[in-house]
Structure formats: C-alpha cells, structure tokens
Amino acid sequence: MEKAGEHQRQVEDCVAFLRDSFPFSPELVIQLGTGLGHFANKIKSELTLPYSEIPHFPQSTVDSHSGNLILGHLGEKKVAVLQGRFHFYEGYSTKEVAFPIRVLSLLGAKTLLLTNAAGGLNPLFQAGSIMVFRDHLNFLGENPLRGPNVESWGPRFPDFSTPYHPGLIKIALDSASHCKIKNVISGVYVCIPGPSLETPAETRWLRDCGADAVGMSSVPEIIVAKHAGMDVLGLSVVSNVNDPDNFQPIILEDIIATAEAMEPKLERLLLEIAARIPS
C-alpha cells in the first residue's frame, strides 16, 4: 500500500519551490512530446528550469525529451511549457509521470494543451496527420489516482464523460482550417505501456477496441489534469499507420523524423489554438 502523505508532501514541496521561483502563475500548460521540443523557442521566456533542479521532479531518460520547465508568454497568454515528458516504460509510476501536471494545477494553471507522437491505427489516417483527441483508452494497467485521495486536489471519483473539452476540440479544428493545415482529424487515442512496439495481432485488437492512434504517453497526465479541474486538449502527430495485414517494421528514428518534419505545421496550429483559448 502506498505510504499515505508522502506523495502529497513531495507535491507541496515542489509547489512551494516553484511559487518562490515563478514571476507569475501560468494559466496554460503546454506539454511537448517526442520530436516536438523546438516549439519552446516560440515562448518569450522569463524562466527556464531544468527538471534536475526542481525538487522531486522525475528525470527524462529519453534522448528526444530535453527536460526543461519554461515559464513565459505566448502572445498574451501566461504559459508553462514542459519540454519533454516521462513515461511509464522508463520505470516511473503513473503518479510520478503526472507529477508536473499536479504541481502546475496547484499553481493556478487551468488548461492543459498536450502533444505527442503516435502510431496510426485507423486505416483512413495518413502518416503526417494531426489527430485531435476526442476520447482515450487507458491500457497501462495503472491509474495515477490510485491510492489515498487528497480531497482539496479533486474528487475521489472524477467524472470522465467528457475527458476532452468540446470547446477546445472545436478551437483546434477551427484553427487548423484557419491555418489551412490539411489532414487534421479527431479520434480516440490508446495508451499502452511499452517500450516494445505493437505486434500485428495487438494492432488488430487495438483497432477492434475502437482506437484510432496508439502511443505510450499522455493519459496519466490527462487523468490528473481532469481530476484537478483543468480543461484538456490533446494532439497527436501520426508518425505512421500500422496495417496488421501488411505489417512493416516500426523504427523509432522514423517516428522521431516524421514528428520533426511535422513540427512547423504543429507550431502554427499551437500558436493559433493558444491565441483562441479564452483567458
């Protein structure tokens, strides 16, 4: 059984440290996924903290995740950017994976805009598409809310009838149309543990479960954000499309290369979305 109070103590220590360090409270959190870290250059930065300097923050062990918390402005918005994330497959619990989101929610952030790279499952998708999360499946086998609940953080049994804010989904799709970015669709994201990639049989099963894209991240952070009362928008860069009847090797370097190639389009989309999100 989890030691009651230890996680709460670590969160509160981190909140106190960042409150003393931050020049202002962020309203919007942007989490950047695999191959998408350069968007941080669009932020008018006022403070950059490596994760290694933040009390109790996990440390990213994946090369494509820089590991910095950046506080600054994106247009008129006060933002906190998580340049890189943590994954269940690195050995962290889902509670540890979502630790930064819990901390930032307690510092006043109201909206989470989250990005990742994912494999396509829907045969109608194309590599290089951007999928707006409409719903998700948590196949990690663990939930970050498991264990003692801190009532001041959120309810014991949070409602997930609308995990992704309908208004933000509309903003994302309208922003894509405004920016003339093609192949922006909505769908269901499924999170699996990893780090091994899917077999053909697993791919077929995930499709049958109703998933349109698959990845190894994001859902723990989304669950904690919703528990904390934040509005959530998720975006996946679809790096490849898995066909279980004509399966091709999935190479991580190819996934990262596709995500990086899509980064300019995603940057334009993120900038437009952020500008349209009400303060």
Image: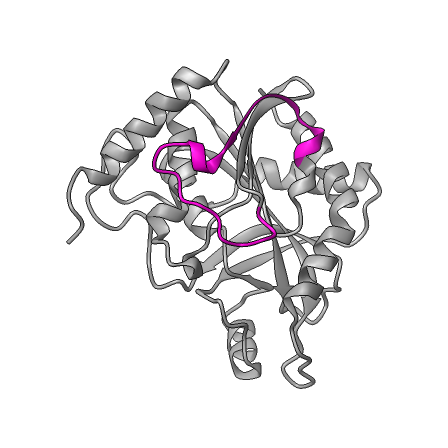
Which residue corresponds to the image point at 66% horizontal and 86% vertical from the top-left?
Answer: 245
Q: Position of residue 36 (x, y in %)?
A: 66, 46
In this view, the residue farthest toward the top is: 23
The one nearer the camera, 226 or 36, is 36
Q: How many marks?
A: 0
Q: Position of residue 41 (x, y in %)?
A: 70, 32
Picture layout, residue 214 above or below residue 110: below
Q: Classify residue 80 by image quadrant.
A: top right
Residue 159 lies in magenta, yes or no? no
Which residue corresponds to the image point at 46% horizontal and 49% vertical from the top-left?
Answer: 86
Q: Classify residue 10 by image quadrant.
A: top left
Which residue corresponds to the image point at 69% horizontal and 20% vertical from the top-left?
Answer: 75
Give the magenta range.
40-65
Q: Position of residue 145 (x, y in %)?
A: 29, 47
Residue 54 lies in magenta, yes or no? yes
Quadrant for the C terminus, please: top right
Quadrant for the N terminus, please: bottom left
In this view, the residue farthest toward the right is: 180
Colour scheme shown:
one colour
> Is residue 79 shown to the viewer in this render?
no
Picture layout, residue 106 above or below residue 148: above
> Is residue 41 shown to the viewer in this render?
yes
Q: Position of residue 250 (x, y in %)?
A: 65, 73
Please state if 5 lies on the left or on the right of 132 as rendered: left
The one nearer the camera, 245 or 218, is 218
Please state if 263 lies on the left or on the right of 218 as rendered: right
